[in-house]
Image: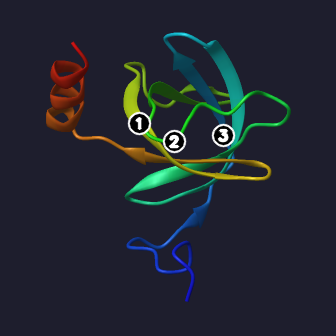
Amino acid sequence: MSKLDARRYERSPFNAFVEVWHPDMGLFEWCARDISEGGIYVRTANSPKPPIGTVLRVRLKRHSGLINIEPLPMRVIHHQRDGVGLVFLLEEDHAMDTALAG
């Protein structure tokens, strides 16, 4: 069984736009493929992929508007040919990452 097949949470198809902000790379709008309690997979099209381990600020949008107004901290956990896997971070995890980086 591959690492990607041994998932902790069940994935569900998810059709939404994903607004991603990276402090050095800027703002991107990607498309979600699926979501779980642990994270989301997004298709990056021809955009550069942030390095694994990078913390991003993410907002999810549907045609009717934003799903979350405040950006969520998410970490890039893997790359695939067509996109990246992002894991939701708890605010405590993000605070620790910020403290270690500073």
If the image is split into quadrants, where does the N terminus sit?
bottom right
Residue at left 53%, top 50%? 40
- Tell me where residue 69 sits by quadrant: top left
Q: Which mark is residue 38?
A: none
- Give the CA separation, mark 2 to mark 1: 11 Å
Q: Provide the secondary structure element on which disc 2 rests.
A: loop
Residue 78 placed where, x, y %?
A: 56, 52
> Mark 2 vs mark 3: which is more N-terminal?
3
27 or 78: nearer the eye? 78
**In the figure, is residue 27 to the left or right of 91?**
right
- Tell me where residue 71 sits by quadrant: top left
Q: Which mark is residue 74?
A: 1
State yes or no: discs 2 and 1 in contact (Cβ < 8 Å): no
Residue 64 placed where, x, y %?
A: 65, 27
Q: Provide the secondary structure element on which disc 3 rests.
A: loop
- Give the CA separation, mark 2 to mark 3: 22 Å
In the image, what residue type sits under mark 3?
Ala
Q: Which residue is mark 2?
A: 52
> Mark 1 vs mark 3: which is more N-terminal?
3
**In the figure, is residue 71 to the left or right of 19?**
left
63 or 80: nearer the eye? 80
Residue at left 38%, top 59%? 37
Disc 1: CA contacts within 10 A as few (<14), some (14-19) or many (>=20)? many
Colour mode of the rendering: rainbow
State yes or no: discs 1 and 3 in contact (Cβ < 8 Å): no
**In the figure, is residue 20 to the left or right of 30?**
left
Residue 34 placed where, x, y %?
A: 62, 57
In the image, what residue type sits under mark 2?
Ile
Q: Which mark is residue 16?
A: 3
- Give the CA separation, mark 1 to mark 3: 16 Å
